[in-house]
Image: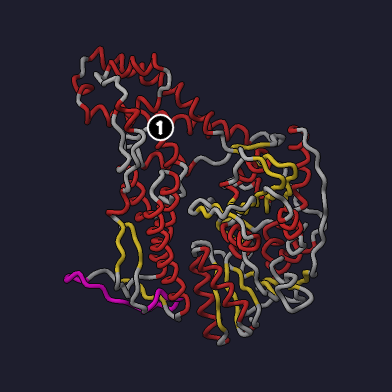
Amino acid sequence: GPTNSGKTYRAVEALRQANRGVYCAPLRLLAWQVSNDLGCSLITGQEVNEVGSGLTACTVEMANVAEVFDVAVVDEFQLMSSRDRGWAFTRAVLGLRANEIHLCGEEGAVDLVKNICKLTGDSVEVNRYERLSPLEMEPEPVSSLKKVRPGDCVVTFSRKEVFKRKQEIERDTGLIVATVYGSLPPETRKQQATMFNESSNSVLVATDAVGLGLNLRIRRVLFTTTEKYDGHSNRNLTDREIRQIAGRAGRYGHSDMDAGRAAGMDKEAHEMIGKAVSASEPTQIKQAYVFPPREYVRSRFHNVFVEQLSQQLEELEASGDPRTKRSRYRDRWLGQLVNDCYLKVMREIRSEREALLKDRNAMFLLAEMEDCEERLTLLKQVPLKVSTLMMLSDAPANIDCSLTSKVFVDYAREHESSAEDILRDAFSDPFYLDMYLQFFDLPRSKAYMRALTKPPALPYIRVLRVRERFATEDLRELERRYHVLDLLLWLSLRFGHSAAEHSKMENARDRCTELIADGLRHKQVFRRRKPSHKGQHRATPTAAGAAGSSEATAAAAA
């Protein structure tokens, strides 16, 4: 069914009655919300809070496909068609072991699920829900932000535009303006939603991040444009995306009006939105994205690594290169070979993906590999075991951000591996392992196995700093710092750092979140100027929201 139809509520109620069950959320906010509602365990990429209940709320990437459940819920399952995160939803739909799996989402994905269940031998029962409150179009476009009313949500598709529209509305109407956009921390989004909901004189300015995860008392959704940049190119919104965003208006139980309303801010956009909202036939989703299982990727890596290692060792032996006996050179040479071979496997899989894309009848497509390849390239000079490299290549690290890239590489360097580590991790077969250890004059003892039980290093503790006064920090810098801390929390769980150090990181992230919230409550953002010749900073106010005159702290890995 569409948004605001009660389908997820019914599924969660079925989950509530189960002894063992799991709710798989598309967003952390929704996982938190269901965890609080059910009083159950919470698992996301950055946090684990187990309360002893048989029920768990998790982000979809964290779904446990080994455990057996009575009931499982996958929310917004139509996101199987997302080329970025679709693999996680498909993995949940195919892999969850439950007597009942409730798939909540759009009508357009029903036939895809039926086709998938023909392959798996599962039965499908379709329950269709109608919207609980109607969604109507305004008769005319809303041509000016001066016509914005309390309860409106103004939708745009970039952070810069969010703050531009916020400033215009505050200047022209005097209304309170809350903001929601993608790079805001989930906690701050929730705070901004609460501010909007609890004020009778407020407006929301948001990107399409408003489409999922927040309960909002929106009366009317106004689209400033129907075009967005999706990370690859500028394109028009799909009918499905328009309905998802417009459907936030008039949500049952969260709005004091009978119907939600939608409008564009120019004639062309208004007509496009009207067609999408009134479309009787849903957009059909015919393909789901998958990611190759780690075991499959590891097996392909092993084949390539054995081939390349044997070939290059023959060349080294023939040349009599003495450097292979020097530990520093040997470690880096082997580490780079591991990276090259793993990158080669990823590129081969990407080529296969591109071939699949040409097959319109393919039910499954391979997810995008570009981000993974970029992270591998960034780590090319760091000698790492393949198991460590695989884990790091999956990390949610935005390497377009220079701060994130630096922290990510510094963290990887703390896990640098010796040639012995690399070989023992790559080969479980004692024949191959002994042969290569002997070639490099490496010991074949049990000391290595004892070393495996040692706790991992905690590299980031030395680089994490909490700074007490930084009036010149701007909001974007705070957001960058938040996402760096979020990345470190993800790494902390994957590499087994202590609960105490994980807690320190959480406290630093929470403080960063508070600063962002403080900033948004002000009317200006303080932007850093370049330091003067004395190395001092001056704070320059810019009209765009605020990072705050508050003398507080930001946690940063710098």
Residue plotted at (55% across, 76% down): 178
Residue plotted at (65% across, 46% down): 81
> From the viewer's perspective, is 333 left or right of 125?
left
**Is residue 545 highlighted in magenta?**
yes
- Which is the main secondary structure of the residues drawn in magenta? loop
Residue 401 versus residue 37 in the image, above or below: above
> From the viewer's perspective, is 209 left or right of 473?
right
> From the viewer's perspective, is 74 left or right of 483?
right
Whether residue 534 is visible: yes
Furthest residue toward left: 534
Residue 291 versus residue 223 in the image, above or below: above
Per the image, label 1 sits on a secondary structure element best described as: helix
Q: Residue 434 or 126: which is nearer the viewer? A: 434
- Rate crowding at label 1 as few (under 14), some (14 to 19) or many (20 or more) other CA atoms within 10 Å: many
Residue 53's spot in the image, x, y percent? 62, 53
Whether residue 145 is visible: no
Q: Quadrant of residue 471?
A: bottom left
Residue behind mark 1: 386
Furthest residue toward top: 318
First to last magenta residue range: 532-549
